[in-house]
Amino acid sequence: MTHGRKYGERDSHPIPLWNGVFEHYDRIGDALWEFAWCIDRITEERDDIGIVLGGSPVKLRTIVDALKGSRKETVRRHMDSLERENYIRRRRTPFGHVIEVLNSRKFGIWKKEKPKNDVSPSLRNLRQRLTLTKSDNLSGLARWF
């Protein structure tokens, strides 16, 4: 999708952030910016866990540089808060933190939900009214249902 919006030198894109986040203001507060950064950097999901940057360690400086005007200690405090409030999970490595977003729902939110593979009510009624006898060809009927 081309829309002409830019983020730095790259094309910009929407970040899927559910409006239910507003109910979490007392827990997230100003850490919303770091949380949005984490959501934007999710590259895959496993069992409702968003994996940030494919599980590569992330240095705090990377987040600070992305959030223009932020300070390292502020970003550190906000990331600590997100972890304490169970929005993210971090694992320290020698090269930074591996970050996971809990209860992630990033992928597929703008795709139309596929309808359930259900039988129409009229066909369901027809099935209920049919009775089979020994002389019926069951394999032939199977093609119709």
Image: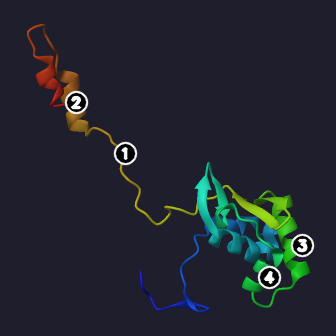
Mark 3 and mark 4 lie on one chain; the one further toward the N terminus is 4
Q: How many marks?
A: 4
Q: Which residue is mark 2?
A: 125
Q: Earlier in the sequence, mark 2 or mark 4?
A: 4
Q: Which quarter of the rendered picture does the C terminus lie within?
A: top left
Amino acid type at circle 1 is: Lys
Point out residue 68 in the picture as x, y percentages from the top left corner. Answer: 75, 89
Q: CA distance from mark 3 to mark 2?
A: 61 Å
Q: Secondary structure at mark 2?
A: helix
- SS at mark 4 in the image: helix
Q: Amino acid at mark 3?
A: Arg
Marks 3 and 2 in Cβ contact (< 8 Å): no
Q: Nearer the viewer, mark 3 or mark 2?
A: 3
Q: Residue at x 44, y 88 (%)?
A: 3
Q: Tell me which numbered mark, 3 or 2, is placed earlier along the sequence.
A: 3
Calculate the distance from the C-alpha at mark 3 to the C-alpha at mark 4.
12 Å
Q: Which mark is residue 64?
A: 4
Secondary structure found at label 3: helix
Q: Which residue is mark 1?
A: 116
Dot 2 alpha-carbon crowd within 10 angstroms: few under 14, some 14 to 19, many 20 or more? few
Residue at image coords 13%, 10%: 133
Q: Nearer the viewer, residue 67 or 62?
A: 62
* Kind of residue indicated by mark 2: Asn
Q: Is residue 31 left or right of residue 1?
A: right
On the image, the x and y values in percent for residue 77 come to 89, 72
| Residue at horizontal 62 percent and vertical 48 percent from the top | 47
Q: Is residue 89 left or right of residue 119?
A: right
Gap between marks 2 and 4 measured at Cα: 62 Å
> Of the residues tagged 1 and 3, which is closer to the observer?
3
User: Which numbered dot is residue 77?
Assistant: 3
Q: Looking at the image, what colour scheme do you see?
A: rainbow
